[in-house]
Image (tube, grey):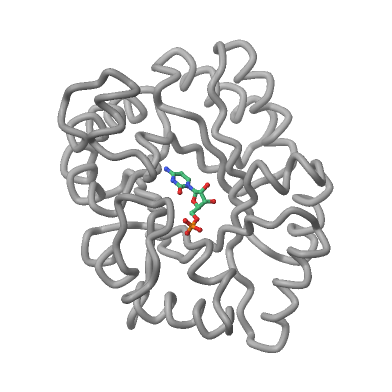
Amino acid sequence: MAKDVIVACDFPSKERVFEFLDLFGSSGYKPYVKIGMELFYSEGPQIVRALKRRGHQVFLDLKLHDIPNTVERTMRVLSDLNVDMCNVHAMGSGPMMRAALEGCSSTNDSRPVLIAITQLTSTDQETMERDLLIKEPLANVVSSYAKNAQNAGLDGVVCSPLEAREVHKSCGAEFLTVTPGIRLAHGEAGDQRRVMTPRAACEAGSDYIVVGRPITAASDPVAAYEYCIEEFLGND
Ligand code: C5P
């Protein structure tokens, strides 16, 4: 099964993202990249096309959450960009996730991997209870949302690495766990609440780790990426 480090390119402009990716030029690495709302909303679809032309795999992280019809139509547009992975919020529920899959499948023979956000890794038990009025233990919420995503036909979920093992237990080894909330040993957690190191995420069964600031804000981003690859993939 594919296992990889995805670099979250949370930059405000294409110039900044290319400047960042150019650092990898002579390293032999061509990182799998994640484009989020900031870059996509500022640069539009051409940023995805440009990254694909440069040979990167692209996870387009727009976290759709709307009525099923809108999500299906939007997903059709996004899969036309030939992204490798895209996502919706599991909180949009089963009909919305099924519509998303329908939208992904309707244009391309090879559709993007479609995953669902369970609970954001910046959300902890206290926030979930206070603001979302969800009183269940967070791990149960994540597993239950993962099961809903699987029943809707999705390929996996975004969750904290702390929940990856539990998700695999309830949804099987083939169901993907894509895990942000990665911090290098001794690094700052920042706004993330549920965090793990790349090695611990690997041991917990994460299939893909998503790493942003620990790489993008490092004094040597290529070395930080290499460190993540070595910790996460080991001798794979
Ligand atoms: O900088 P950092 O490593 O915290 O970046 C994590 C990335 O993963 C960000 O782009 C964030 O939007 C994304 N993400 C997340 N938690 C989720 C889903 C996506 O942190 N549940």
Indicate the position of residue 134 as horizontal and vertical percent values: 25, 21
Query: Going by the image, does 105 lie left or right of 135?
Result: right
Which residue corresponds to the image point at 68% horizontal and 24% vertical from the top-left? Answer: 74
Vertical position of residue 219 compared to residue 208: above or below:
below
Residue at 15% over, 32% down: 137
Viewer can see residue 156: no
Out of 136 and 127, give the one closest to the viewer. 127
Q: Is residue 75 left or right of residue 194?
A: right
Q: Is residue 120 left or right of residue 85?
A: left
Q: Give percent across and percent down for residue 67.
A: 56, 11
Q: Nearer the viewer, residue 220 or 222?
A: 220
Dividing the picture into quadrants, the one containing residue 102 is top right
Q: Is residue 60 above or below residue 181?
A: above
The count of marks equals 0
* Residue extending furthest toward the bottom: 26
Rendering coords of residue 228 (x, y %): 42, 75
* Residue sitting at x 23%, y 29%: 141
Q: Nearer the viewer, residue 125 or 86?
A: 125
Which residue is found at the position 53% from the left and 17% from the top? 99
Locate the C terminus and report the quarter of the image it occupies. bottom left
Where is 11 relative to 103, above or below?
below
Residue 132 visible in the current orientation: yes
In the picture, the quarter occupied by the N terminus is bottom left
The percent position of residue 185, horizontal first and vertical second, equals 32, 75
Image quadrant assignment for residue 13: bottom right
